[in-house]
Amino acid sequence: MSRNSMQWRQRPKLPPTHFADPSIYSDPDLFEEEKEKIFKHAWWLAVHESELPAPGDFRTYRHPGDAQLVIVRGEDMKVRAFLNICPHRGNLLVYAPSGNAKNLVCIFHQWAFNGKGDCVDIPREKAGYQERICRNDVALREVRTAVSYGGFVWVNLDDNAPSLESEIGSALDYMLPELEAEPMQTLWYYQARLKTNFKLIHDTNSEFYHDYLHIYNRITGMLKPDTGYFQRKYTAFPGGHASVGSMNVSYESYKSSGRGQLGWPHLAPNGWKLVDLFPCITFNLRTSVLRIDSYIPVAPDDVIYEFRLLGLKSDSPEIRRQREKDSAVIWGPFGRNLHEDLLASSGQGMAMANGSEAMYVLQAREEDLTIHDEVGMRHYLAEWSRRIGRSSSDPYASERLAARAA
Amino acid sequence: MTHTVDRSELEELVYETCARLDEKDFKGFLGLCDPAFAYKVSAYAPEVQREMTWLDRDRAEIEEFFGMLPKHNTDRNPLSRHAQVTKVRLDAARQRAEVTSTVQIFRTQLDGGATELFAVGRYLDTISLQADAPRLLARHVKLDTRDLGWGTHLPL
Ligand code: FES
Ligand SMILES: [Fe+2]
């Protein structure tokens, strides 16, 4: 029987860990809290070191904590990140997303900065500032940077945040042999603006019950008992991270998959490993390519989806072409699965927009931590609740209690 | 048999491929293609200074893909491809023509009918002149647009 308004908005008779209040996906105030309490203190995967191979190479990154960054490889080959802002009158220092420069020179009044962030030139310095200000006083603001877990460049705006290693813990350990086997190379960088909440799209990487969305997954995995499909287990790690156990995908079942011939060092042929990191980064390694999803939340209903594809630096052009081809079948803007994933998470964004009469979101499947168990999302929201200081199933409980007392 | 063509015949072929795809008449589209047809979509990413090949399919792969399309969940808002042939180079020795077009692809919402620009780029077509009518031998869609939102399953 259908439900009336009150029944529809009723809390499910489940433990509070097993459902989420829909406002966590749409409420602008909660989004501001996420920014203050999570985004500005988290380690974000900004770029891959192969995107700035030579001294003087730079890349820009739009940080979810509302900061523009520029990441530079110095003369000493060290990768450093700075706020992309000129300390003179606050102009954007670098406009292009990538490039090479001996010094970063601001177009406005030509102040120049080297790869260590030192100011190395101020036109007519003494004439205007005499002894009151000198170039030593106006260096760039350096942002904490770590190059790790396969050459990714991670940044953190919070000078006092725990180290990257302590935040990730052992979550990436099971993929480390593959990540560190050989230097990697970014092959694709793809960005798409989506009208949805970043957590909803991250969820599509942490729940596999949505195999029902993908004809491809049903054919190559779910309907093939010998692949170990239903035996895969989630492992939850402290900090809201989770991994999914390896399986063998029978790509042969899908004729034009083109997969299976070309592998990845240390990964079993046809293997698959996936790690979701809090707050919204996914490492996804399938047979011949590493896919990295990272999200830049812009507003509760607006996210920049970043998608990278990586191969190996040692690849010949033919191997590189094959990796791209392997990936294009499922992933990429024309891939069979990515389009379906983005349709679904965008559909959630549309249906549960702020002000809609959305119901509590169910995350209640329990299947002994196997692949259709929804523990991945529960584990994520437990960490979210801890960091925000609010329950994901009842985020405004304290305000309600206070109002009642008053 | 060497087929002599004039430019308008080649232009018509390009425009007809657009019309067949716009109508999701994949059989009709393949009917305009050579048995050795190859299809590719690429875009240059300034972020990483690399050409990315987002699709790379031979005729068998594209046929299989068209066959699977009804089983996929997919964006059903229609696309319309507006091409303009800008350059034709005949290679008489190889009985081929290289035809370049600019293309704008629009998407019209089924719900409400609003039209938005979906992508811009170029078609770099190789057309075979060996048969009695020109046939599309290879199409390389070189996109300027890289943010395609939730994407599409359809060839552009
Ligand atoms: S604002 Fe950059 S030099 Fe003046
Ligand atoms: Fe998916």
Image: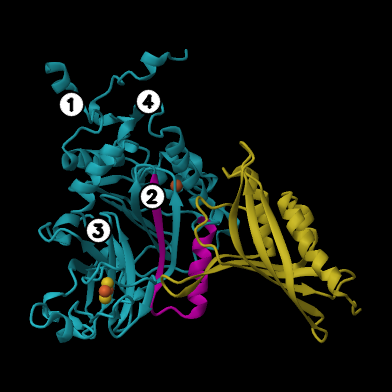
Chain colours: A cyan, B yellow
Find the distance from the CA under tag 3 to the CA under tag 1.
38 Å
Quarter, ligand 1:
bottom left
**Which contiguous range is marked in magenta?**
A302-330
User: What's the residue type where badge 1 is placed?
Assistant: Glu
- Does the residue at mark 2 contact the one at mark 4 (Cβ under 8 Å)? no
Q: Which residue is mark 2?
A: A303
Q: Which residue is mark 1?
A: A399
User: What's the residue type where badge 3 is placed?
Assistant: Leu
Mark nearer the viewer, 2 or 3 = 2
Q: Is label 2 on the same chain as label 1?
A: yes
User: What's the residue type where badge 2 is placed?
Assistant: Val
Q: Earlier in the sequence, mark 3 or mark 1?
A: 3
Mark nearer the viewer, 4 or 1 = 1
Tell which subunit mark 1 falls on: A
Find out whether residue A163 is within the magenta segment: no
- Does the residue at mark 4 contact the one at mark 1 (Cβ under 8 Å)? no
Tell which subunit mark 3 falls on: A
Q: SS at mark 2?
A: strand
Q: Position of residue B108 (x, y in %)?
A: 64, 45
Q: Quadrant of the C terminus of chain B?
A: bottom right
Q: Earlier in the sequence, mark 2 or mark 4?
A: 2
